[in-house]
Amino acid sequence: MTQNSSLEFANARIKSLENNLLTADKITRMVDSVTLDEAVKILAESNYGGGMGIDNPRLFDRILRAEEKSVTEFICSLMPEGYGVECFVLRNDYHNAKAFVKAKYSSISDTNIMLKPSGTVDIEKLQEGIMSDNYNAFPENMKKALEEIDLAFVNNNRSPRKIDVMLDRAMFVDIFGRLIGSKTGIIKQYFIKLADLTNIATMIRSKRANMTLKSFEESFINGGALEYSALAALYEMNVESIAEAMRYNDYAQAFARLSEDRNDALVKYEVYMDNALLSVFKAERHNMFSPAPIAGYYLGKLTEIKVARLILVCINNNVEKSVIRQRLRELYA
């Protein structure tokens, strides 16, 4: 089978599953549910978690985790080579690496609740390698980051933030390296936007936490369209002035949202960010010669799982319905 026909086959399989995505109507019903049990039953209607049953509705996360594992394994079994789709599951490897490194250097004994499904590296092999300091079977950029983290901790630079920063930066180097020579630009377009929107949020968070420019530089992710120098030049301005200075930039809307003087500005920015990223693939979701359908479906599934978890957590904690609605993301369905 050629790579082109493999892509067409994968997209055809994806198209047959799109009708099973959660609709806006089902999400509305979940939000309006009077009880947690009522909301969980709506997921059961959609065969979430393969129809997994739970005795206590408060154990809903088991269903969501099973659904994420199922869709990730499906995508891994289906994704064609040469298009960069593997970069989406590669993120799970780096997420899990963070969890295992933090467990190695702390008193965390059970990492299960912190983990994502296996990506390109089997999760048991990832754990075994990190706990034994043997990184040879891992992606080269991950290996280098893990070695640098070990050295930092030996030198008493023991910070969970350092673990996150070093592995995040390594992940993007890994991703953009894999996308060199990709058969299409849309996957790279997504990750460029992800890097840019992440850097914008990091800059504002750093400023609000009164962190130094050097600290922001250490967290900056390379590979996006926004250069570090451009954001560094804005760092000493207040957020309102930053939004004004960037009003003609492609990310003007992002800067404007973060400049809002409200406690939930960052929360609302995360909603905006998720919607903006999903929109990258929506425009090409019907192009059977593009990896957009398979990438969009996977990202769409992860988004709906995130939305379902948000709703259920909020209902379980008696959060007002109006607050829940403000935090909902756009769906792919």
Image (cartoon, grey):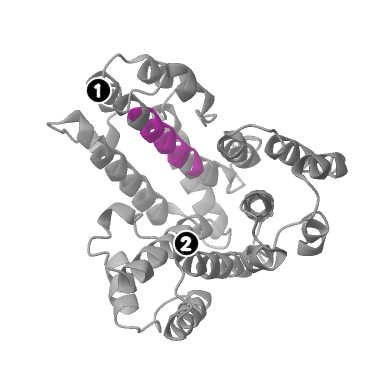
Q: Is residue 328 above or below residue 192?
A: above
Bounds of the magenta span?
Answer: 299-312
Residue count near mark 1 (Cα–Cα under 10 Å), binned few <14, some 14–19, many ≥20: some
Instruction: Specify whether 174 is left or right of 310.
Output: right
**What is the secondary structure assignment of the residue under circle 2?**
helix
Question: Whole-Å distance between the Cαs marked 2 and 1?
Answer: 32 Å
Looking at the image, which residue is at 29% across and 33% down? 48
Q: Position of residue 287 (x, y in %)?
A: 62, 39
**What is the secondary structure assignment of the residue under circle 1?**
helix
- Nearer to me, 102 or 227: 102
Q: Position of residue 96 (x, y in %)?
A: 38, 62
Residue 325 in view:
yes
Magenta-span inclusion, residue 64: no
Q: Label 2 amino acid?
A: Leu
Contact between labelled residues 1 and 2, with CB atoms less than 8 Å apart: no
- Nearer to me, 285 or 249: 249
Q: Position of residue 282 (x, y in %)?
A: 61, 35
Residue at the left extreme? 55
Q: Which residue is mark 2?
A: 90
Mainly helix, strand or loop, the magenta region?
helix
Looking at the image, which residue is at 37% across and 28% down? 314
Q: Quadrant of residue 324?
A: top left
Residue 287 in view:
no
Looking at the image, which residue is at 37% across and 35% down? 309
Q: Quadrant of residue 67?
A: top left
Residue 41's mark?
1
- Nearer to me, 72 or 184: 72
- Nearer to me, 143 or 232: 232
Magenta-span inclusion, residue 311: yes
Chain-order first, disc 2 or disc 1 = 1
Looking at the image, which residue is at 37% across and 45% down? 71
Residue 254's mark?
none
